[in-house]
Structure formats: C-alpha cells, structure tokens
Image: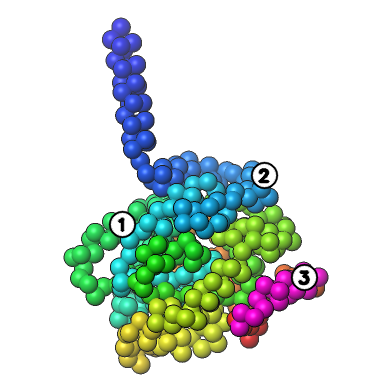
Amino acid sequence: MQVFIVLPLALTTAFLYARTRWKSMRMIDRYSFKVKLMIKLGIAHLLHMTGLSQILRVRYLYPIYYTASNGYKTLLSNTGMAAVYEEALKFKIRDDDVFIATYSKSGTTWMQQIVWLICNNADTNVAEDKPLSSRIPFLEAVDMTDNVLLGIQTLEKWQKNKQSLGPKTEKLIKTHLPYGLLPEDIQSGNKCKIIYVARNAKDVCVSFYFFHVMNMLLPHPGTWSEFLKNYSSGNIMFGSWFPHVLTYWEKFQTDKERIYFTTYEAMKKDMKKEIVAVANFLGKKLTNEQIDIIFNLCTFDSMSKDKSTNYSHGKNLGMNFKKSKFMRKGEVGDWKNYFTVNENAAFDELYAEKIKDSGLDIPFEL
Ligand code: PPS
C-alpha cells in the first residue's frame, strides 16, 4: 500500500527538482547537457549511421539565420549555438589572453601545439601527457566531456583558478568564431593577442568535407559536389570562408601589435621561420635547442603519432577514425584530387570576385 504513496511522491519530487534545476540553468549549460546526453546514449552515432543526419541536413538547405545581440548576422548549425555565441560575446578576457583563431580545418591544431610549446618552454613532458584540447580550451565548444572538449564553462572555472597561477601565465584559447562574434571585450578594446591562421580555400573545403564524413556530431555532408556547393555559398557551419578570413586580414592591416596573420602554406613552407615569428609576436625568447624541439614535435608525422594531438581520444567527440583520420594528409594541393575541372573553374571565378582588391594572396600549391 505504502508504495502507492511513496512512489508517486518520490517521482513528483524528482520531477519538480529536475524542472527547477533545468529552469535555473543557463542556456549554454542546457545545450551542453543535451549534447552530453546525445553522446552518452549514442544518439549522435545512430543518426549518422542510419543516414538520418543526412535527412536532418535540411539545416544546410534551410539554414537558421541568426542575428546576435551585437547585430552580427550569422548562420547556426543548430539552435543551441545561439546560446554559445551569446555567452562568447559576454566572455571576459584578460590582456594576456592569446587567441588562436581560424576558419575550421586551417591548421588550428598545428598552431595550437606550436603556441603551447612556445609559451611553456618547449615542455615535452606535459605536452605529451595532456590532450591539446584540454591544454587549450575551445571557446565556443560546449563542455561535452570532462577532459576532452572544453568550452566557455571550463574557461570560466580556469579564469577563477588562474589567480593562483600568477599574472605571467597566459591563457591560450582556440576559436573558430568570425571576428564579429569574438568577445565584446576584444572588439571594443585593445585586449589580448590574436594569432590567425588562414589556409587556401580549396584545401579547407576538402579537409572540412572529410571532417563531416568522420564526425558523427555533424550533419552528413552528402556527396562531395553537394558539399562544395554548400561551402561555396556559405551554407555551412561557421558560414562562408570569405568574410571569415577577409575580416581578420583587414583587422591585421591596422593592428599588427595585436594580430598576427599567417597561413598554413607559410607554415608548411618554413615552419621554423613561423615558430620564431610567433614567438617574437608573443614576446618570447627561444633558444635554438627549443626551436628544434618545437619543430620536431610539430611535424605532421610527429603530431599524427602523438596521442595528445591526433585526437585519438576523439571517440567522445563523435569522431569515427575508420571513416577518416583527424590528421588526414596535411598537404597543400590535395584539392586537385577532388575538384573536377568544372568545379575548379567555377570556384576560381567565385574566388576572384570575393577576394579582389583585398591584397590577400594564399597559394593553392607550393
Ligand atoms: S579543426 O578541427 O578545425 O581544429 O582542424 P584544424 O586543426 O584547423 O585542421 C586540420 C587539418 O590540419 C592538418 N594538420 C597538419 N598539417 C601539417 N602539419 C601538421 N603538423 C598538421 N597538424 C594538423 C590536418 O591533417 C588537417 O588537414 P587535412 O588536409 O585534412 O589533412
């Protein structure tokens, strides 16, 4: 008999408690919670494997346009990202924060490893021990699992703990946000340093295509040609490549103290030169021995084998390495294996139109 009283009472109490907790949560925490649940229950994998995510790709066909509170117009890959963008705008930064900003698939991980080593005296022990994604949190990623992909929530906690680390320890932050969605603290003042890496738009497209193929948390890319069309029209996560790269490029022209702009191709051509240039930009002195250590740890070969940089922990992030590796090829010019002659001609025309008069010159081959 008692069970008929105790059970409903317990269930009602649990329900009311959960509802109150849910209501008091910030939007970003609710979104994080949903993503964590999706991963835990394997829903993300199920959607991708069954092709349902392909159907849900309507998100790309009927994109969700969003105007952020600062007036910046963007495209959401899913509704939860609105909460993330708003939190990112409000995010408080310090003068010595260092942002590594890129359009996705442009050499972010590579530059992260270089910058981390520069700022940590080429400390190989810690570098090999801790995944890069926990050494350098990803600003707009929701907090998916405790030690894997860290977002605003983790950075906030870090911010508090940082007082004890002393003022000289810079905080390194990864972001794919367009300039217009960076924290307002950056947009309105002179705070922090930004290292921007751009990569030629064709190789980015190929790398991004394979990233969609292997990442169960992203909508299925469809065929290569479909993906290229969406990429060319900017109907894709992070929006169009063109305004992303061009805005940072423009800011760099008038603010070289605060922004360092480089390319994947320049890193490929002469990595040591880039290591020294980034160190100078950050006001760090490196010995020749340290430069050699950093160089050796940051080659494609080393980073592909290194568990802290090759995302082999990426299963928790929805990555399926059987479909494609995160460290895939690491080359300049791989686009030639995927663009048809017609696709290439159409893209060249679009590129010339968008890039004209900008003075930006990123080589498509070395
Ligand atoms: S992400 O997910 O947006 O952060 O990806 P991102 O790190 O920007 O880009 C991944 C591509 O960069 C290549 N990569 C490298 N190339 C050369 N040398 C090194 N050390 C290196 N590290 C990463 C990686 O292989 C991806 O490019 P593709 O063309 O797909 O191989």
Say what amino acid the circle numbered 3 marks.
Answer: Ala
Q: Is residue 233 above or below residue 366?
A: above
Say what amino acid the circle numbered 1 marks.
Answer: Glu
Q: Given contact means CB atoms under 8 Å apart, are the residues at marks 3 and 1 in contact?
A: no
Q: Characterize the magenta stretch by its predominant secondary structure.
A: helix
Q: Percent position (x, y) of residue 295?
A: 43, 84
Residue behind mark 3: 346
Residue 353 on the magenta span: yes
Give the Cα distance between marks 1 and 2. Answer: 36 Å
Quarter of the C terminus within the rendering:
bottom right
In the displayed structure, does residue 294 sit left or right of residue 1?
right
Residue pictured at 50% horizontal, 81% vertical: 253
Give the Cα distance between marks 3 and 1. Answer: 45 Å
Residue behind mark 2: 55
Q: Element under label 1?
A: helix
How busy is the neighbourhood of tag 1: few (under 14 within 10 Å), some, or many (20 plus)?
Answer: some
Q: Earlier in the sequence, mark 3 or mark 1?
A: 1
**How is the rendered protein coloured?**
rainbow
Q: Earlier in the sequence, mark 3 or mark 2?
A: 2
Marking on residue 156:
1
Q: Is residue 57 visible?
A: no
Q: Given contact means CB atoms under 8 Å apart, are the residues at marks 3 and 2 in contact?
A: no
Give the Cα distance between marks 3 and 2. Answer: 27 Å
Magenta stretch: give its range: 342-359
